[in-house]
Amino acid sequence: MSTVRVLLTVAAAKNWHLHQLDVNTAFLHGDLHEDVYMKLSKGLQCSDPNLVCKLTKSLYGLKQASRQWNIKLSAALADLGFTPSENDHSLFTKSTGTTFTAILVYVDDLVLVGDDLSEIQAVKIFLDDKFKIKDFGLLKFFIGMEVARSNAGIALYQRKYALDLITDCGLLGAKPASTPMEYTTSLSKASGSPLPDATIYRRLVGRLLYLTNTRPDLSYSVGCLSQFMDSPTDAHLKAAYRIIRYLKQSPATGLFFSVNNSFTLSGYTDSDWGLVKTPENPSVSKKHATVSRSSSEAEYRALANGTCELVWLLKLLKEFNILPPLPVDIFCDNKSAIYIASNSVFHERTKHVEVDCHVARNKFKEGVSNLRHVVSSEQPADLFTKSLPPGPFSHLLSKLGLLDLHKPRNTSLRGM
């Protein structure tokens, strides 16, 4: 999903064409390189019922099917001059002296992006001749997400998905909530009484997790609820329904990628989570897999995670022929972590920290990043680490580059 967001960010800023393709019966195109046998299909007349079929092509249901399809598609795109990305194997790029074209693959769905319409048409003809494709034209709907475009930029949102979720929960008439989670209470495994049927809770949280692709404001609350999937209670279910009520106030909210983008990156890191973004366009956030011995160490680990994401993002943008200015500012609200990362002498309290965590210090020395302090009240990464009151929540939410398509504004977005 980070690659999808980066792709749309670049396409909006560069005014590139965005098209969508679908490959017919994709898995049936894969070639099998090992012996696979299949029982005779029902209704097939054969004199010897003990005979079996030896497959030369893959079928839906085979464990090899997805891998063989990927190999087949990758080989075809290589013949066309595309190069697979080293930073995301679902991305293929082709650059000449005058044109740039990229293809993002999700199983059998392809997003075709480029600055030359004739080149895009040539790719379509090649793929249709090779595999037979459905050409959906301009990108409007991709893996459950809706896309709208105007002269102002590109919006990525999941309004239909959100409304279906609200309807299925029976909360269309419920009062909207101002925040996705209560900031005065904390949940634990002992909260409430066990649910007689945990399936309802698990299905709901699973659907909410997919919604976080375009709604980063839900990330913390949904992440908290996903920790109770093994034994959910009525208190956990009530908290999940609060997220639905929060969703009800703006189901059409999603990410907005502006045409005005200088690709000057900035990063925000906080304990347990890290957030790297381009102006108005959030990219990614991650949670720590280890427990730190102090707040400074936790913040230092967050700096390391944020730096790693920054390095990956720089490599990915380079494949789009974009070189953001260096060093990139990384903001942290913990001065101790900044001192540790910027000090060339190992601090006594960091001797136990794994060497790979010092990537923040190394990239600072190399001039890739510049570590800066930010007050907690202006720290967007707080949205991914804790539940906030309505005021601070709304203030920090405005920094994430979200847009409600149904809210009155000066510039309206129309479907592509």
Image: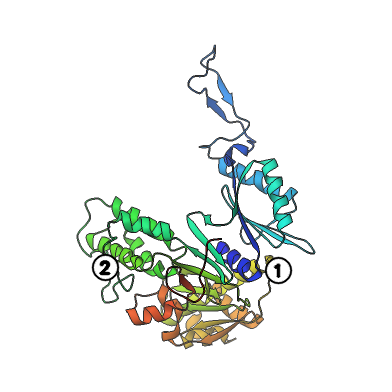
Going from the N terminus, do you reach mark 1 or mark 2 first? 2
Tell me where residue 221 sits by quadrant. bottom left
Q: Amino acid at mark 2?
A: Lys
Q: Which mark is residue 232?
A: none
Tell whether 228 sits left or right of 128.
left
- Residue 279: % across, % down: 56, 77
Q: Residue furthest right?
A: 97
**The disc labelled 1 sits on which kind of residue?**
Asn
Image x and y of residue 283, in percent? 53, 69
The quarter holding residue 33 reads top right
Q: Is residue 96 left or right of residue 243?
A: right
Q: Indicate the position of residue 252 as horizontal and vertical percent values.
A: 42, 65
- From the image, state whether disc 1 or disc 2 is nearer to you: 2
Which of the pair 123/88 is nearer the observer? 123
Let me know if residue 354 appears in the view.
Answer: no
Indicate whether 392 appears above or below 85: below
The residue under the point 47% across, 55% down is 144
Q: Which residue is mark 1?
A: 321
**Residue corresponding to mark 2:** 175
Q: Residue at x 66, y 76 (%)?
A: 324
Q: 410 or 56, which is in the foreground?
A: 410
Query: Disc 1 and disc 2: Cα gap in Å?
Result: 48 Å
Give x and y (percent) for residue 32. 63, 35
Q: Residue at x 78, y 61 (%)?
A: 96
Q: What residue is at 52 percent from the left and 70 percent from the top?
A: 256
The answer to which of 253 and 362 lies nearer the viewer is 253
Answer few, some or many: residues within 10 Å of disc 1's Cα (few below 14, many 20 plus, some between 14 and 19). Answer: few
Is the C-beta separation of discs 1 and 2 under 8 Å? no
Crowding at dot 2, Cα within 10 Å, few <14 / some 14-19 / many 20+, comes out as: few
SS assignment at label 1: loop
